Amino acid sequence: MNNIIANCLCQWKNPKHCSLTPTCKGWGCRFLATPIEELPTTDKEKAKLFSKVYREAKEKGVLECPHYRSLFIDEVLENINASNVTLQNMN
C-alpha cells in the first residue's frame, strides 16, 4: 500500500476524514482531485469521467484503502445527473 494512503488510513477516525473538505465529499477521498471540466450529460460522457477518476484512484493507491469504494464515483455522477434534471425543470 502507498505510504501516503497507509498513513491516512492510520489517522482515520470516521468517514468525514475522507472528505476533500469539511463541506465537500468530493470523489470520496481527499487525495482524488479530478476536476469536472464540463458536466457530463450522456452515458458516454459519464463513463469517460468515471474512468478518469478511477484511473487517478488506481494510480494513487486509493483503491487499496478499505474505506474507499468506487461507488463514490457513481454517487457523484448520479448527483450531477439529478442536479442537471433540477436545472432543466427550473428553466
Image (cartoon, rainbow, N blue to C red):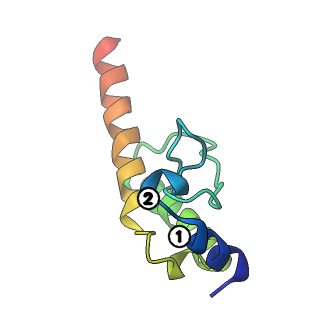
Q: Residue furthest right?
A: 3
12, above or below 28, in the image = below
Residue at the image position 60 percent from the left and 42 percent from the top:
21
The picture places residue 66, in percent across and down from the top left corner, at: 44, 77
Comparing 11 with 77, the one in front is 11
Q: Which mark is residue 54?
A: 1
56, above or below 28, in the image = below
Read off the residue under disc 2. 73
Residue at the image position 37 percent from the left and 54 percent from the top:
43
The picture places residue 2, in percent across and down from the top left corner, at: 68, 83
Q: Residue furthest bottom?
A: 1
Q: CA distance from mark 1 to mark 2?
A: 8 Å
**Dot 2 lies on which element?**
helix
Tag 1: amino acid: Tyr
Comparing 17 with 78, the one in front is 17
Cβ atoms at labels 1 and 2 below 8 Å apart = yes
Residue at the image position 31 percent from the left and 24 percent from the top:
86
Tag 2: amino acid: Ile
